[in-house]
Amino acid sequence: MAFELQFFGATERVTGSLYVLRAGPHTLLLECGLVQGTREEELRNREAFPVDVARIDAVVLSHSHIDHSGRIPRLVKEGFEGPVYTHDASRALCAIMLPDSGYLNEKEVEWENRKRQKRNLPSIEPLYTQADAEACIGQFVGLEYETPKEILPGLTLTLYDAGHILGASMVELTYVENGDSRTLVFSGDLGYRDAPLMDPTRRLTRADTVLMESTYGDRLHRPIEDTLSELTGVFESARAAQGNILIPAFTVGRTQDLLYLMAEHFDRWHLGDWTIFLDSPMGIKATETYSRYRHLFAAQLFEPKSDNPELPNLYATRTSEESMTINNVESGAIIIAGSGMCTGGRILHHLKNNIWRPQCHLLIVGYQAIGTLGRRLVDGAEDIKLWGDTYRVRATVHTIGGLSAHGDQDDLVGWYSSFEGRPPVYLVHGEERGQVPLRKRLREELNAPAEIAHYQQKITIGK
């Protein structure tokens, strides 16, 4: 029985998820994400796909984050004509996020080609354009949770709530051939048990092989009340300093968590003394999508019968002109802007105007991949470069780990422990520092056959 999986992305690293699954005569991609990090690492996005695009029958996507979905427009651009199966809410979010990614590709290449022209170097083409990304959405097929669908002969897909972001799914793929049935379960990105907004991660019990993320396999998140107390201290010190607070936030997931927590703790954090800017067109659209799919989570984020979050002093700045007016605000602004790892977007402009000011505060609330500006700031960079100019880092940098949308080591071990018979588990979507201790704990506490997946490694499901 040919039911095989081969690893081509997010092996011993967090971004660029991509796995090739072969079920009998059929080939599908599980995830098709962008590699994010240093300029050299991101060049991998231009490498040829690991299989002939014409032979790919379908794509299965766990959720909309760009490190999972961001190469789909390029796949379609190169001739892929099949379906992309994902949750219906993920389809809606991809319709926002992928065109934005295409737009950023165009702008980055435009900037790069200006430099190349001065050096008499040949120009380059964007990985894909905004138009390419908009065109690929027509191939997305939206599914619901816990509704099995035969997507290829003998291959059935079922999605389960992963508790990570809106529409994020665990992927169950069952292949039946000649009466023999084998099941692969891919965790996708698993949510944190104290997640502010999303519902708890669904537990599954049956699998022949498990593919599990390991982003925070080396740590335990702080209890949520400790995190809330830490945020209280940040807001109090920022108020006393009379500066601004910058929050680079992933526009899908982290932004909505922040808005919910700000509404819930409005008085505790004295947020009435601030003006809160959601300075992210994509974040604004994503929040509206959360409103449309509010039946997927129990928390009360929005005003009844409204798309507006329950924050009276929230201003959504859609246009560039509206965003630029924030530059005139020297005190009392909380600015939530993308990108979450400070690799592009409006947060860079706000860093340019605030990072050198000692009365300002930078609040890091999400994972920062190696090679990103956000990671440099977390690691204590004394200065940063923006558009060729150097800026001294004098703002106070806070790292709030308890707001992660990813489960910690306890969540990961707990999720796997629900599987009967301890099926083989392969760790992906994590760096070595997280994967080694997670593998050790899985082996020692659960006697699990746990391995770290390696690039190009091939496994047979159920063996």
Image (spheres, rainbow, N blue to C red):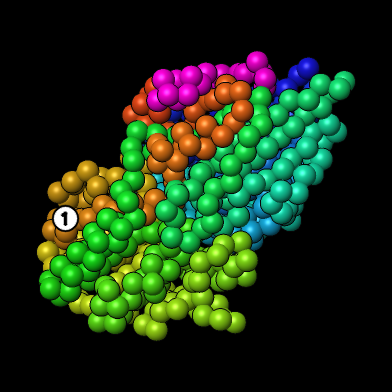
Q: Which residue is mark 1?
A: 393
Is 236 part of what is drawn in magenta?
no
The residue positioned 55% from the left and 65% from the top of the image is 298
Q: Is residue 53 above or below residue 441?
A: below
The residue positioned 40% from the left and 25% from the top of the image is 441
Q: Quadrant of residue 419?
A: top right
Q: Is residue 386 visible?
A: no
Q: What amino acid is at disc 1?
A: Val
Residue 266, image x, y percentages: 33, 76
Report helix, strand or loop for mark 1: loop
> In this picture, which residue range is highlighted in magenta?
441-463
Residue 410, image x, y percentages: 41, 38
Residue 340, image x, y percentages: 39, 55
Q: Quadrant of the N terminus?
A: top right
Q: Residue furthest right?
A: 178
Q: Is residue 62 above or below residue 334?
A: above
**In this rendering, position of residue 447 left or right of residue 73:** left
**In this rendering, position of residue 162 left or right of residue 138:** left
Q: Is residue 87 visible?
A: yes
**In this rendering, position of residue 373 left or right of residue 237:** right
